[in-house]
């Protein structure tokens, strides 16, 4: 009996199930994949609510979807989520959309996210917000957000707010007291109680909390307005002491989940001041009777073991801000008593490196990723590693070449971004495994790190790699790898490997070239071989000698859609105008932003640019344009139903 075609397995599903699936897809992908498939899908996708995420999108797809919205005005009323970005790969996107549409046209919008908006764009958008009465979620994590403009955020249905800094009374005196979830990039400790007072329904709060003008004697007074609704608190400390933490926790009597990240900065003299199991046991017992989940990460500076007399000044300075290794291990043992392991099932691990210690709850959760070097000493019960899937939360891993040999028993199953670090020159393990590296490190890496989900590879070595075999094996085991960051001198040495160049050409769509002062001596003309190998690159970061190099890059890289370029000299208005004139001679549509010695270019080289949108009669839908662009998306989509 013949097999039913893959497409048919999906098409035999009832409309209700298909609609439920399609609603979870990003609108541009949804239309590109199904708009011209058949009349049934054509009807379905024009009836369902749409989520529109323009982050990381290519400009040609952005232009095409804008054309769809202009030719079908009803589409805007079905968009319930909109995400706009001025990030490096989509510079000028917010202004491009606002030049075509007003947010007031998206009448059913419930979620709005702005990434790196310009000041003038913020003013325009905030002026439109009062008309978005259905807005439930608003995110503008940008420090340039003006206090005075936020007073218009008194929206009746606003419940979730993500902003770049505390808004003081401009937000809290309005009718925004129904907010239940709030994320603020940074907030003074003295302002936290004001937020809790003016948002009594707050259930979730996330911020980096700093001391500000807070006085230590204030901790003696119980807060008058505790956050009785707050059940989830996730914060990073900025030079807080244990009294500050006590003041904060006194306001959260019904807290169920507490996430704490204490990583001191370079000038922070309080390294490890919160690392005390008995104090935390007292705080939890006294103020947090309902606490069920406690995740924490303490980073502590370790006192170096100086052997030379002339280092005594450095030693004395380090003594004021660093811990001795045996004191850290003694304090760590205090987290192993019955209160932590028996009563709450909270387990703790510690890794010691040359100059720092990281004490964290199991499984590891830190958002900043994990760094594994050959001198890392991991202290924990080995049974916990398998029982709790120790490092399953790590998606960003930094690892030295020899660390995989020493720590091959560890497992990293969900790594998306992998950084190959350099070893320290005096690293014992680096010397010991120097001869073994070529033999064992490849196989050990494959055992330790599951490369199937890997998307980004960062090579931070700034000299010739001793062997390209490690990179070659990574490409063989990482089918989704599409981005690489590397120094030019390292990359050029790798181009002698024909097999590796084939992977570069077929898989890499994002190329980021690090540069240091010595790299300016490498003439841009010497990169011609690089552009030939990476001819399928869509996003590029590099340095250039002169503005003419930009046009050269566009000629060398036909698929380039985003360019971030830096120069030794600053770009002025004349050079910017000259570049715009050169770009105008090319077919396509370009967004250009110039800042000092850097320029960002968002590119759409299409036969028809967005200029045609000024006349709706000239709009064409290009039914066949999407076939090549989205063949990969369709293939991956149908793979789910095989």
Image (tube, rainbow, N blue to C red):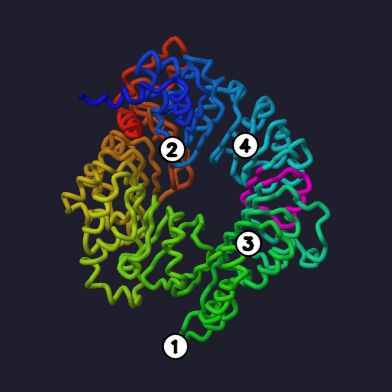
- Helix, strand or loop at label 4? It is strand
| Residue identified by numbered label 3 | 238
Specify the quadrant of the image occupied by residue 630: top left
Residue 356 vertical position relative to residue 563 in the rendered view, above or below: below
Which quarter of the figure is the N terminus placed in? Answer: top left
Q: Which residue is mark 2?
A: 56
Q: Residue at the location (50% across, 18% down)? A: 47
Q: Quadrant of the C terminus?
A: top left
The numbered mark, 4 or 3, whose residue comes first in the sequence reads 4
Between disc 2 and disc 1, the foreground one is 2
* Sequence-first disc among 4 and 2: 2
What SS does tag 2 mark?
loop
Residue lying at the far top in this picture: please name it.
Answer: 617
Crowd band around label 3 with a 10 angstrom C-alpha radius: few (<14), some (14–19), many (20+): many
* Residue highlighted by disc 4: 138
Judged by depth in the image, the label closer to the viewer, 1 or 4, is 4
Residue appearing at x 38%, y 24% in the figure: 32
- Circle 1 packing at 10 Å, graded few (<14), some (14-19), many (20+), is few
Q: Residue furthest bottom?
A: 309
**Dots 3 and 2: beta carbons under 8 Å?**
no
Counting residues from the N terminus, which is met first, the one under dot 2 or under dot 1?
A: 2
Q: CA distance from mark 1 to mark 4?
A: 57 Å
Residue 574 bears which disc, if any? none
Q: Position of residue 456 (x, y in %)?
A: 36, 49
Reading the image, the residue beneath label 1 is: 308
Q: In the image, is 338 to the left or to the right of 408?
A: right
Q: CA distance from mark 4 to mark 2?
A: 19 Å
């Amino acid at each position: 009996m013949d097999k039913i075609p893959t497409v048919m397995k999906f098409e035999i599903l009832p409309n209700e199930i298909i609609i439920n699936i399609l609603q979870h897809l990003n609108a541009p992908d949804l239309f590109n994949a199904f708009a011209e498939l058949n009349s049934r899908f054509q009807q379905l996708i024009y009836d369902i609510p749409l989520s529109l995420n323009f982050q990381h999108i290519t400009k040609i797809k952005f232009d095409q979807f804008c054309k769809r919205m202009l030719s079908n005005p009803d589409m805007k009323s079905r968009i319930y989520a909109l995400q706009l970005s001025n990030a490096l790969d989509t510079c000028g996107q917010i202004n491009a959309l606002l030049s075509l549409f007003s947010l007031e046209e998206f009448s059913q919008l419930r979620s709005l996210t702005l990434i790196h908006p310009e000041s003038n764009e913020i003013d325009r958008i905030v002026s439109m917000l009062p008309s978005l009465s259905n807005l439930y979620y608003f995110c503008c994590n940008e420090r340039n957000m003006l206090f005075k403009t936020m007073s218009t955020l008194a929206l009746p249905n606003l419940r979730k707010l993500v902003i770049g800094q505390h808004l003081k009374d401009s937000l809290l005196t309005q009718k925004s007291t129904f907010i239940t979830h709030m994320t603020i990039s940074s907030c003074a400790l003295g302002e936290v109680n004001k937020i809790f007072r003016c948002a009594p329904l707050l259930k979730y709060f996330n911020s980096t909390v700093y001391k500000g003008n807070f006085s230590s004697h204030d901790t003696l007074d119980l807060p008058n307005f505790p956050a009785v609704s707050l059940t989830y608190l996730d914060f990073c400390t900025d030079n807080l002491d244990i009294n500050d933490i006590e003041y904060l926790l006194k306001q959260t009597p019904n807290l169920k989940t507490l996430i704490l990240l204490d990583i001191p900065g370079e000038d922070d003299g309080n390294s490890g001041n919160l690392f005390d199991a008995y104090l935390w046991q007292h705080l939890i017992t006294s103020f947090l009777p309902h606490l069920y989940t406690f995740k924490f990460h303490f980073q502590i500076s370790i006192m170096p073991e100086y052997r030379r007399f002339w280092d005594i000044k450095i030693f004395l300075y380090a003594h004021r801000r660093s811990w001795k290794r045996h004191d850290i291990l003694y304090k760590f043992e205090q987290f192993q008593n019955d209160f932590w392991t028996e009563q709450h099932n909270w387990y703790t691990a510690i890794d010691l490196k040359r100059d720092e210690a990281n004490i964290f709850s199991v499984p590891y959760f830190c958002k900043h990723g994990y760094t594994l070097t050959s001198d890392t000493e991991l202290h924990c019960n080995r049974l916990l590693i398998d029982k709790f899937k120790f490092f399953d939360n790590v998606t960003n891993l930094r690892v030295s070449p020899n660390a995989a040999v020493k720590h091959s028993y560890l497992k990293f199953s969900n790594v998306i971004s992998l950084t190959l670090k350099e070893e320290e020159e005096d690293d014992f393990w680096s010397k010991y495994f120097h001869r073994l590296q070529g033999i064992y490190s490849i196989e050990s890496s494959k055992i330790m790190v599951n490369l199937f989900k890997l998307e980004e590879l960062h090579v931070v070595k700034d000299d010739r790699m001793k062997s390209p075999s490690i990179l070659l094996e990574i490409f063989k085991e990482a089918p989704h790898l599409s981005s690489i960051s590397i120094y030019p001198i390292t990359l050029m040495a790798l181009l002698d490997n024909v097999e590796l160049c084939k992977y570069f050409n077929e898989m890499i769509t994002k190329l980021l070239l690090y540069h240091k002062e010595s790299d300016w001596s490498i003439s841009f003309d010497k990169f011609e071989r690089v552009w030939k190998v990476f001819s399928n690159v869509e996003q590029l970061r590099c340095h250039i000698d002169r503005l003419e190099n930009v046009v050269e890059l566009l000629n060398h890289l036909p698929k380039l859609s985003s360019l971030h370029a830096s120069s030794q000299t600053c770009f002025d208005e004349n050079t910017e105008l000259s570049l715009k004139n050169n770009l105008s001679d090319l077919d396509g549509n370009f967004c250009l932003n110039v800042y000092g010695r850097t320029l960002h270019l968002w590119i759409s080289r299409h036969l028809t640019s967005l200029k045609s949108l000024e006349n709706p009669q000239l709009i064409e839908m290009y039914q066949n344009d999407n076939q090549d662009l989205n063949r990969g998306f369709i293939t991956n989509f149908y793979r789910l139903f095989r």
